[in-house]
Image (tube, rainbow, N blue to C red):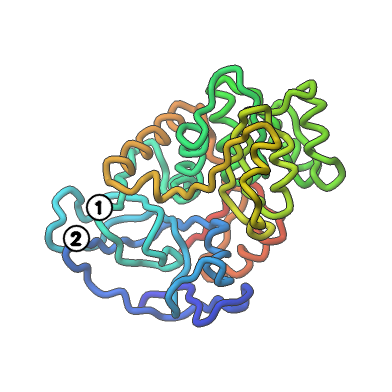
Amino acid sequence: MTKAIRIHQTGGPEAMTWEDVTVGDPGPGQVRVKNTAVGVNFIDVYHRTGLYPVELPSVLGMEGAGVVEAIGTDVTDLNIGQRVAYNGHPVGAYAEARLYPADRLVPLPDAVSDQQAAAMMLKGMTAHYLLRRSYEVQAGDTILIHAAAGGVGQIAVQWAKHLGATVIGTVGSDEKAEIARSRGCDHTILYKSENFADRVKDITGGEGVQAVYDSIGKDTFEDSLNCLHRLGTMVSYGNASGPVPAFEPALLAQKGSLFFTRPILFHYITTREELLATAEELFEVVTADVVDIAIGQTFPLSDAAEAHRALEARQTTGSTILLP
């Protein structure tokens, strides 16, 4: 039997159980993948708690890498034994093996390891749509990235520096500030002891930043808006502290005719062409050593609950992966 982490009801990390599951043979358009590494992301916490509902019982997980074990009918561009990676629906990555739609799998180049892929497919593609499509960073821009020492944050900092931006990052500790600076962050702000909006204004001479990339949500929302330059863009892409409260659109006008967007990755990689093009750009910056994928911590797949506890306590840096 195949082992997997599954929830039967929403709740805390204790709701996650290590149990036998039946995988079966791939149907038309499907592939069975033997996972070799699995990524941990905050969206997994949202699924576990019920913030983003999933059908129960459910195996958690949105991101992984592995080897093709079996191929269903109508699959012509993948081979048994081929290395592949994935992110996105359907959930179910926290498993030793799983079925997955063939048209959502990305072949891995030799220069990208399985652990790298599991650590970057979702986070790296998120950084891509943040910096290249939600607000397209230009050379000379100054931007603010929250959680700059986290999985998405470290990738985004490096990529934004490559694009010619000045990067300000918020972090939760001196240790994380050092990590963010090592990735190229020009200025770090300890959000627990400093008002980050005031510090941003000091750093920018009162001008503010062209864009804020905010994965925190409720606790940072209004001050993130206060960091923006006139006509600046607020990209709200996560809810680590809870959902952003309802607000009047007039607030954006009052603060400088600001732009606000709440994107999710999967609308940027809906088609196979978009998926492969995004993966190609990500692989290019990684294999060119523009972006280093930092795996901050690994856990056995069976200890996924501990990984969630560390993630929610903000004790992690870089990417977290599970090893089957």
Amino acid of disc 1: Asp
Q: Decide: few, some or many residues near mark 1? Use Cα within 10 Å; few <14, some 14-19, many ≥20.
A: some
User: Are there few (<14), some (14-19), or many (20+) residues within 10 Å of tag 2?
Assistant: some
295 or 274: nearer the eye?
274
Q: Nearer the viewer, residue 276 or 271?
A: 271
Residue at x-position 45% and y-position 51%: 118
Mark 1, residue position: 103
> Residue at (19%, 68%) from the top-left corner?
27
Q: Residue at x 74, y 29 (%)?
A: 187
User: Where residue 71 sits in the image (x, y, percent)?
Assistant: 19, 61
User: Secondary structure under badge 2?
Assistant: loop
Q: Which residue was labeled with disc 2?
A: 29
Q: Are marks 1 and 2 in contact (CB under 8 Å)?
A: yes
Mark with earlier residue (1, 2): 2
| Quarter assignment of residue 67 | bottom left
Q: Position of residue 224 (x, y in %)?
A: 70, 41
Between 219 and 90, the one lying in front of the other is 219
Count of numbered circles in the view? 2
- What amino acid type should be assigned to the residue bearing mark 2? Gly
- Report, in whole angstroms, how far the alpha carbon at label 1 lies from the one at label 2: 7 Å
Q: Residue 246, how many percent across, how many down?
A: 64, 56
Quick check: 29 left or right of 3? Answer: left
Considering depth in this image, is 212 or 319 the residue closer to the camera?
212
In this rendering, the answer to whether 7 lies above or below 285 is below
Residue 9 x, y percent position in the rendering: 53, 81
Considering the image in quadrants, where does the N terminus appear? bottom left
Residue at the top extreme, as displayed: 140
Say if 229 sits above or below 169 in the image: above
